[in-house]
Amino acid sequence: MYPEITLKRGREVSLRRGHPWVFSGAIAGMKGKPGDGDVVLAKDSQGRGLALGFFNSRTDIAFRALTRETGRVIDASFWEERVLAARQLRERIIGKNTSAYRLINAEGDGFPGLIADIYNDTVVCSITTAGMEKQRENVLEVLIGNLKPARIYEQSAGRSRSMEGLNQRKGFLYGSDQKGSVRVMENGHLFEVDFIGGQKTGFFLDQRINRERLGALARGMTVLNCFCYTGAFSVYTAAGGAKKVISVDSSESACAAALEHLKINGFSPEDHPVIEADMFEYLRNLQGSFGMIILDPPAFAKTKRDVPKATRGYKEINMQAMKHLAQGGMLATFSCSNFIEEDLFYKIVQGAARDAMADVQLLARLEAGPDHPLALGHPEGRYLKGLLLRKS
């Protein structure tokens, strides 16, 4: 029914263990003439069916698994089953006071190359693989039929699409009420999400449980929120009883949004100031100490070539933060760079503590919330790494 690829002997092991990717060098032969983005059947060297998945001749990742059920037809009904499963999970894990969450997390939900985020009555999606591009109309039909949103906006842009042979694309896919922002609630806190002009799909939904955790620890503390973006960590820590929260970002529009978010949640800008500044320079010139510092920078390493420079950047900000952390103070430090692996990030932070001459306790490892599930055999999907530390 579908074209076939045959893997070299022994190269099926990772696929059998649950890793969803097959690299081009693992393919021994092909039956049929699949186009980029077509569904193919992957077989082992003995001719036994392994999985159906997307094929792309342009990329190192030549096959992205969809299902082990090799007799399935990949059509609208297939995607409807997947969307219903994703909805059932979110209904169980998302609280009633939250209207912003991730519904579909790419391979983690069985949709290689598709992200779909819910912002109240708005769906914002991103397609990054040729396979999902070819299934776009089927998936769109299912999302509209099952979610009945007011609007769907597409944010399909970035390096991954170019590598897959796709053009950049942004715009409304559905809905006559086409506005660019929507107010949402997260754990009872209010945020205005700019899903057209904002970063990613407009809001960093992956940090929800970490915001909740730090908010609960912030009572009585003076907090420095570095790279604050639109101030979500600031709102949570202020709500948790922090004496003062200082929010810093280099973006004028992000600072304006952070200030607005503090205001709509009932917090005074006099008590919780927002400062527009280069974060590296600000940390170098910083005076005084803080009970809590939050480091949630943008991705410093967007390619493998960026790793050495990114390593220096992460070390610098962590060292400066540790120097300005009060005795007994807490540091929450994150990396969202795919190319900075967890072990490397840990070593970078260790080196920063050594250079700052700080004795530090590890309280917890932090990661994305459960609305960002991962396939167990796909560690590459775990892009967000974080450490919660205490200066002892």
Image (cartoon, rainbow, N blue to C red):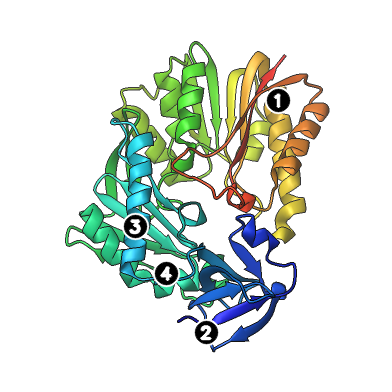
The reply, left or right, for residue 321 in relation to residue 274 is right
Observer-nearest of 135 and 19:
19
Identify the mark nearer the N-term, 1 or 4.
4
The reply, left or right, for residue 384 in relation to residue 327 is left
Residue 68 placed where, x, y %? 52, 63
State the residue at coordinates (17%, 62%): 176
Disc 2 marks a residue whose amino acid type is Pro
What whole-number distance in Å separates the C-alpha atoms at marks 1 and 3? 48 Å
Q: Which residue is mark 2?
A: 34
Viewer can see residue 188: yes
Residue 16 placed where, x, y %? 63, 59
State the residue at coordinates (53%, 14%): 221
Asked if the residues shown at circle 3 and circle 2 are in contact, with their CB atoms under 8 angstroms apart, the answer is: no
Q: Which residue is mark 4?
A: 72
The residue tagged with tag 1: helix, strand or loop? Answer: helix
Eyeballing the image, is 199 above or below 228?
below
The residue tagged with tag 2: helix, strand or loop? Answer: loop
Mark 1 packing: few (<14 Cα in 10 Å), some, or many (20+)?
many
- Tag nearer the camera, 1 or 3: 3
Mark 3 packing: few (<14 Cα in 10 Å), some, or many (20+)?
few
Residue 172 placed where, x, y %? 28, 64
The residue tagged with tag 4: helix, strand or loop? Answer: loop
- Tag nearer the camera, 3 or 2: 3
Disc 1 marks a residue whose amino acid type is Met
State the residue at coordinates (55%, 50%): 375
The mark found on residue 322 in the picture is: 1
Observer-nearest of 324 and 331:
331
Observer-nearest of 357 and 138:
138
Q: Which residue is mark 3?
A: 81
Identify the mark nearer the N-term, 1 or 2.
2
